[in-house]
Amino acid sequence: MVLDNWGRLQKNTPMLSKNINASTLSPEQVWDMLNSGRIDEVKVRKFWTASRHYILFLLAFGLGIAFTLFTSSANTASSSQGPIDLKMAASVIPSEPAKPEFSKENLLKEIQNLGILCPQVVYAQAELESAFLTAGMSVKTNNLFGMRYPGQRPTSAIGLYLQGKDTIIYGTRAELRPYLRQATYAVYAHWTDSVKDYKLWQDYSFKTRQKYIEFLSRVYATAPTYASRIQEMVSSK
């Protein structure tokens, strides 16, 4: 027993083996020396029970400080990358298709796409009224056809041009109504809006069906009530 303990003592406490031998120690002394370096588990448990709240608080506090330092360094790194590329950001946001640049070909195509009656006639009007957006106030107003600002019908105009004062005023119909007693022209955001407004004017002013019925009564029929009878028949359907 003593010799076994002495071997363990030499292994765990090599510095003591030079001055102590097994014959000078009792078994109890050897046992005490072997267990003197061990941690008392009971004391550890008591210490943990009494101090665990403080230990957990310090641990949480340290983790909070570390997280704050990490996030602040990340923000600093991201800000050092420079300003946001607005062009790249704008490319992600869906936008309206770009409107076509003005050309004679695009004008005729726009007239035809909108289903405007007599497209070649309307195309000639654009040449006569504005010299294809090169003459007079048409350059400032995008007004291809010399259209006046309307007081009643629907319109795509966004303002009016006071001819005598060479002034453009933007606003709603209610805001612009007081100026309609003067010589005014419609103002458009884009030349294609001028073509749209011509279509609105044509639909509002030129009733195709009624005009055709009147045409039939003049050149096709002899009965004086022919047009009214056709009109009643069409209206009832």
Image (cartoon, helix red, strand yellow):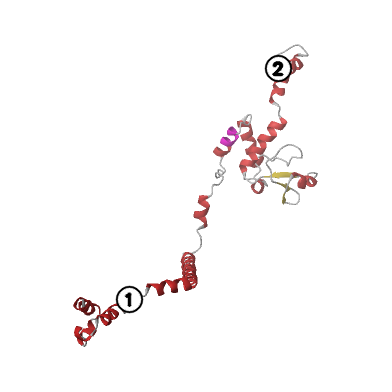
Q: Quadrant of residue 206?
A: top right
Q: Is residue 217 above or below residue 26?
A: above
Q: Position of residue 114 (x, y in %)?
A: 61, 33
Verify whether residue 63 appears in magenta: no
The three-letter code of the residue at mark 1 reads Arg
Say if 43 sits above or below 23 in the image.
Answer: above
Q: Position of residue 138 (x, y in %)?
A: 66, 45
Position in image of residue 136 (x %, y %): 67, 46
Kind of element beneath mark 1: loop
Dot 1 or dot 2, earlier in sequence: 1
Q: Which residue is at the front of the view, 199 or 90? A: 90
Provide the major secondary structure of the magenta segment: helix
Can residue 111 be found in the magenta stretch? yes
**Residue 31, position as x, y percentages in the image:** 27, 78
At a point 21% along the width and 86% down the height, the residue shown is 24
Q: Is residue 175 left or right of residue 77?
A: right
Q: Out of 29 and 201, give the one closest to the viewer.
A: 29
Q: Is residue 175 left or right of residue 31?
A: right
Question: Against 214, is 20 above or below?
Answer: below
- State the residue at coordinates (58%, 33%): 113
Density class for disc 2 (Cα within 10 Å; few <14, some 14-19, many ≥20) is some
Residue placed under numbered mark 1 in the picture: 38
The span picked out in magenta is 108-113
Left or right of 25 on screen, residue 97:
right
The residue beneath circle 2 is: 216
Q: Relative to residue 40, is residue 227 drawn left or right?
A: right
Seen from the viewer's position, the closer of residues 160 and 82 is 82
Circle 1 residues within 10 Å: few <14, some 14–19, many ≥20: few
CA distance for labels 1 and 2: 120 Å
Q: What residue is rendered at 72% in x and 13% in y?
A: 221
Instruction: Say which amino acid is labelled 2.
Output: Leu
Q: Is residue 59 visible?
A: yes
